Amino acid sequence: MGRPMRQTEIEVAGTTLACREAGAGATVLFLHDAAGASWDPLLDALSIRYRVLAPEHPGFGRGKIPDWMLSVGDVAFCYLDLLHALDLRDVHLVGHGLGGWIAAEIAIRSSTRLASLALLAPAGVESLEAPFDDIFAWTAEEFARRQFHNPELARDWQRAQAELDIDVVLQNRTALARLAWNPRMHNPQLAYWLHRIDVPTLLVWGEEDRVVPFACHTPFKRAIPRAELVALPQSGHALPIERAREIAPRLEAFFQGAKGSKG
């Protein structure tokens, strides 16, 4: 079990972000995927040795979509403002799916306050051999099924999602559409700027990912200097749930290796 989780709010340049937080020590800033914010087993495990901050993206949950939020790049600037507002330094930035895309957009803009970058099956860069399917056309059942390799976990997750406030679910989908409707789930320019990432970078991907296909790792691995890839067989997209037990110690070892190091 991790440390007790508490819910707080963070004011960032006129925008209020809901945030889950637990633990103490070096800061891990975790950016959630398209389904919305939650306190997943991976965060719980990391909070034993680290201070884990898990904000809800602008416009998700019960937050109003800000007028300024027109792209993932805008959200990246918001999180750079958050790092500045909280005066966070040597941060281990971890992003999953949509959150991985945001994390990459943060790192290409500025890595000054980062110690490391971990991208868990990030969206943001499309592979020509495995283009993104239309996430907005999936039913709730299909969305759940695609998240997991283990069908039992998919059914459990779908039941949990069905119990969420429908207003929150619809708000999350609306916010996602604002960020990733056209083009679907990627930024055609991002691949050109990944070379700017100059902190130690770890890519973690499920080989059976049916949301962000495993083939999408190639442009990230090719472009980010010295990026390391951890490929997980028999694993789907929901890495912070399905593979938390394997990923947590791997991330902790990566954080330790990146400590005090850049590039």
Image (cartoon, rainbow, N blue to C red):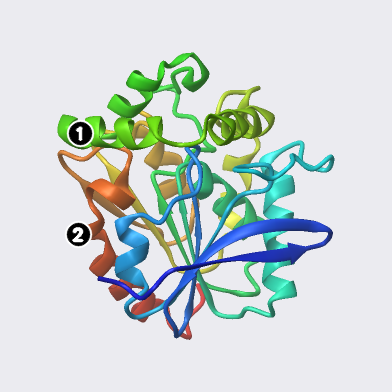
Determine which residue is flagged by label 1.
149
Q: Which mark is residue 246?
A: 2
Where disc 2 sits, the SS reads helix
- Quarter in which the N terminus is drawn: bottom left
The amino acid at mark 1 is His
Which one is earlier in the sequence, the residue at label 1 or at label 2?
A: 1
Which residue is nearer to you in this view: 138 or 141? Answer: 141
Q: Which mark is residue 214?
A: none
Q: Is residue 188 visible?
A: no
User: In the rendered view, does 129 fall on the left or right side of 55?
Assistant: left
The amino acid at mark 2 is Glu
User: In the rendered view, does 113 fall on the left or right side of 54?
Assistant: right
Residue at the image point whose x is 69% and y is 76% from the top: 86
Which residue is nearer to you in this view: 97 or 48? Answer: 48
Residue at the image point whose x is 16% and y is 42% from the top: 233
User: What is the x, y in percent for residue 21?
Assistant: 50, 69
User: What is the x, y in percent for residue 191?
Assistant: 57, 41
